[in-house]
Image (tube, rainbow, N blue to C red):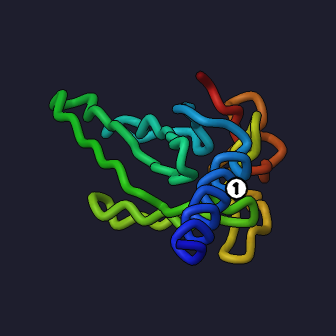
Amino acid sequence: MKKAFSIFILCISIVSYAQSNAPFIGKRDFNIMEGYSGTGTPAYYLDVKKNGDVYFGFVQINQASGEETKEEINAGKYNPKVMKVHFKTNDETLYLKFDKEKIYLTDEKGNIQKSEDCCSVSETESGSCTCDSALYQ
């Protein structure tokens, strides 16, 4: 009986830690890369569940045909250093990290990337911008 109770307490502790580890619970939208093509810019989002699981997804509407493409994947438990996200639909792999207010495009080690693809129209003269985005509710 003591063993079963100990295992139960351990499970509760793990679930509690996963819940408190993430900076928020719920769904947030973001836009790190500026879009320029006629296929439409994907609208990305992340959804942090109460158990600490993080889902990333996107919805993209082709501006020419009106065709909608979407995908959502479970990227695992929240990791503040870096999370690997692989979208099979577009064969796209992203490395991301996020806090309560922002999300960052990183390399495999969690270093925040800089790229001209991340510049807004007003920043294009600078040539290289930090790849980040506010998280919108």
16 vs 35, nearest the viewer: 16
Occupied quadrant, residue 14:
bottom right
Which residue carries the number 1 mark? 17
Residue found at x 70% / y 63%: 106
Q: Tell me the quadrant of the picture where the C terminus can be found.
A: top right
Q: Is residue 117 above or below residue 36?
A: below
x and y percent of residue 25 in the render? 60, 36
Residue found at x 35% / y 49%: 72
x and y percent of residue 41 in the render? 42, 37
Assign a secondary structure to mark 1: helix
Residue at far front of view: 1
The answer to whether residue 43 is seen in the rendering is yes
Occupied quadrant, residue 125:
top right
Residue found at x 36% / y 35%: 40
Label count reads 1
Occupied quadrant, residue 15:
bottom right
Residue at far right of view: 126
133 vs 18, nearest the viewer: 18
Amino acid type at image mark 1: Tyr
x and y percent of residue 97 in the render? 69, 56
Within 10 Å of the Cα at label 1, are there few (<14), some (14-19), or many (20+) other Cα atoms? few
The answer to whether residue 95 is seen in the rendering is no
Residue found at x 68% / y 71%: 107
x and y percent of residue 27 in the render? 52, 32
